[in-house]
Image: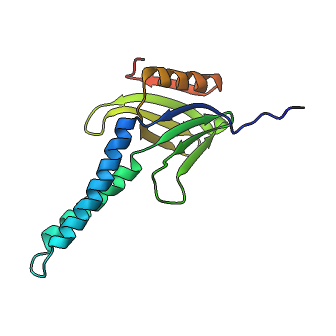
Amino acid sequence: MVKEDSSKVLSEIKASSFDNIIGAFQFIGGIAGIIYVANQMTKNSWGGQLSIIIFLIILAIQGLRSSITLLILKDKLIIRRPLLLTSKTDVSFKTPEIKEVVFSKVKGRFGGPHIIIKSRRDNISYRIAGSDMVLSSFIETLTALNIKVTMDNWVL
């Protein structure tokens, strides 16, 4: 009897290289800005510089958080944040737990293509990137696993 390997990746969406470059520049720019502004601080004027440092720290953290990879395995969907510096970089959903996956084009400042994963325990939204061919392959794999897929304001 041959045992099926449930760890085999069926489909994958990575952040585009452009998104990774932006994230790297945000992180490096944030760290470089913190060092520069910290060196410019004096005893008499530190309030403005402190505000700038806080902003640059947030910029650096956002750069690390922006990179994600979505993986579909036979029994689960994994969202991986490879640049996150914590011990919990993966969020996973078992296939039976997933109620629906919505692909949506969001308008506004943080708009663009998003994936919304609706499960029994929570709903999570991520901004995604990828070519139409990669996304359609991802959608086909979800459909083959009997996961309901909805396209909201989205045309492939």
How many badges with numbers are in the image?
A: 0
Extreme residue in the top direction:
156
Image coloring type = rainbow
User: Is 79 or 1 nearer to us in this picture?
Assistant: 1
Residue 14 x, y percent position in the rendering: 47, 36
- Image point 9% across, 80% down: which residue? 44
- Image point 60% across, 28% down: which residue? 147
Residue 84 x, y percent position in the rendering: 46, 54
Location of the C terminus by quadrant is top left
User: Is 111 or 30 nearer to us in this picture?
Assistant: 30
Residue 143 x, y percent position in the rendering: 60, 23
Location of the N terminus by quadrant is top right
Quarter of the view holding residue 103: top left
Quarter of the view holding residue 27: bottom left
Q: Is residue 32 left or right of residue 89?
A: left
Q: Is residue 5 left or right of residue 1?
A: left
Extreme residue in the bottom direction:
43
- Image point 32% across, 56% down: which residue? 60
Quarter of the view holding residue 46: bottom left
Q: Is residue 29 left or right of residue 71?
A: left
User: Is 37 or 142 nearer to us in this picture?
Assistant: 37
Residue 16 x, y percent position in the rendering: 40, 34
Extreme residue in the left direction:
44
